[in-house]
Image: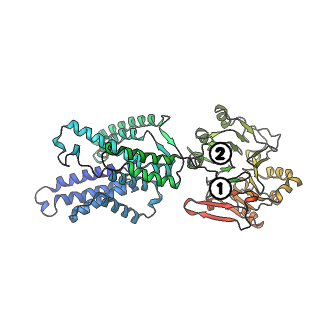
Amino acid sequence: MHLISISGLHVTMLAGFGAMIAALVWRRQTLPLFIPVGKLAAAAGFLTAFVYAWLAGFQIPAQRTMYMVGVVAFALWSGRSPRSFDIWWWALFFVLLIDPMAPYTPGFWLSFGAVAAILYAMQDSDGLLGLPTGRELELHWRYRVIQALREACRVQAVVTIALLPLTLYWFYQVSIVSPLANAVAIPVVSYIVTPLAIAGALLPDFIGKWLLIPAHATMDYLAIMLTWMASWRWAIAWSSQPAWWALVLSTIGIVIAIRPGAIQESWMPRVAGLALCATLFVQPLSNINLSNGEFRATVLDIGQGTAVLIETKTKRLLYDTGPIQGKDNAGQRIILPYLRGRGINHMDRMVISHSDSDHIGGAATLLKEITFDSMMGSLPSTNPLLANLEERKVPSIPCRFGQQWLWDGVSFHIWHPHEQTIFEDQHPRKPNEVSCVLEVRNQTTSFWLTGDVEKQGEADITERLTQASLKNLMDKNLIFMAPHHGSKTSSSQELLSALRPDEAFAQNGYRNRYGHPHPTVTARYQGMSIPFYQTPTTGAQVWEFLSKSELKQSEPVFWRLHSKRLWHRQPQ
């Protein structure tokens, strides 16, 4: 996408073409006496770059190239000769001046980072095979081709190495196949597809269509080849978001590895620099701050749906997998990037509350990329997910009241549906009413995940809350997920009165079409003095539950990280 629409190479190429056309026209008669040909050509080149950047939507890479062309044009008009990095700094200044929020986008860092790396690594180039620039044509064409290929390979290697920290930080992956793919795609798109496509768009239809046809055919075959290359098993190396110290060490290593000069004369320091870059692939110890009996619950901001990650000292459980919207789903868009950013590629259990698409939507995607040891859920026997699990040899068991297990001193209890429930498509109750209700409990806290259970299911749970079980919950801080995203058919007064939650939360979409949470339900929580947190307001919520020995006699910790929309709470 970058190569086709917003490549700086294409902006520069078209700017040069516009300058050339302007120079050819302006050389006629006495026009150069008014404005020198070079100055007019520079102005025309900048105007061409501006139009192309405008057509490309003024994306950061296109802006960067346009401003660099503009700085060169201004220098020519003012009789200056700027250095390469001067041009780069001025382009950076203009981008930040016009769009101060640009650094929050990956394209800003990738674009300016790649160009800075190229300028730094290639700054001592003396021309072809040691000849001064401008005398390259004195050599045989074979030597010129060989040297051009060498420089192209070095530039590609420089960009690949220099962008390692940025690509891992933003995308948690490194493309192994990209240098090979770029070696084919860059010249094909730049010198065949782009000229033919632009010429076909500008020329009259009876000529332009004969240029657009080969442009389309070339792009079609290129896409087939790139799809084939992307399907190779080793095409992508997945990792996690690097720690700050790994980013610092790798940056030092990159400066050493791509430094200017002959590679043969300094290969040992370059190898040492690459070794420092290997720290980027060190997997983080994501649960290092959890002890036995402690757990963390991450309520992801996935819109109108449910997805909650439960972590103990050594185990992980994912409760629901978010919604599906057309071809997109929360598993691919939110959950999987979050897990990869944390370096999580294995999950001990998946719990699916019920079969609604806003709870099961991301499951198929996650099964392709994450290893699950088991699955528990309230699903009819004909649900495609069960066949998917069977094909992957992942054991699945139905969710029923009375089931419980212990992980690292943290207990898990199933409160609903009834132990005699049979999951079939013709079940007398709708899927919401047989939602799998899970309680996670340690010495200090009871954390309830309720799916979409409604009034009838809530009445069943209320009956099961015997005096003995309530006594076990009385001395604990109870955190309650509002059932069915705060629907008016849930959060019954009877269940809330029985549990008496200390705090509650809801996962729902901003201005969702169902009106969740319903004002009546919100008023009910407020009337019982229960703080009610909603993901459209808080963003992702991270709840940490410590053991009794770790608690301090102080007020609860509460803060928000606005840049990541991350709300953090430690109930005590």
Q: Residue 433's spot in the image, x, y percent?
A: 76, 47
Lower sequence index among marks 1 and 2:
2
| Residue 54 visible in image | no
View extreme (left): residue: 29
Quadrant holding the C terminus? bottom right
At 66% from the left and 60% from the top, the residue drawn is: 534
Please state which amino acid type lies under the numbered disc 2: Ser
At mark 2, the secondary structure is helix
User: Is 86 on the left-hand or right-hand side of 170?
Assistant: left
Q: Nearer the viewer, residue 548 or 205?
A: 548
Q: Residue 486's spot in the image, x, y percent?
A: 71, 57
Q: Residue 271's spot in the image, x, y percent?
A: 41, 44
- Reading the image, the residue beneath label 1 is 508
Category of crowding for the residue at label 1, using alpha-carbon neighbours closer than 10 angstroms: few (below 14), some (14–19), many (at least 20)? many
Residue 139 appears in which quarter of the rendering? top left
What number is the disc on residue 357? 2
At 67% from the left and 38% from the top, the residue drawn is: 373
User: Is 217 on the left-hand or right-hand side of 435?
Assistant: left
Q: Nearer the viewer, residue 461 or 325?
A: 461
View extreme (right): residue: 467
| Residue 160 visible in image | yes
Q: In this picture, is 93 found above or below 248?
A: below
User: Is 125 on the left-hand or right-hand side of 570?
Assistant: left
Q: In this picture, is 162 found above or below 184?
A: below
Category of crowding for the residue at label 2, using alpha-carbon neighbours closer than 10 angstroms: few (below 14), some (14–19), many (at least 20)? some
At mark 1, the secondary structure is loop
Residue 65 appears in which quarter of the rendering? bottom left
Q: Residue 452's spot in the image, x, y percent?
A: 72, 50
Please state which amino acid type lies under the numbered disc 1: Asn
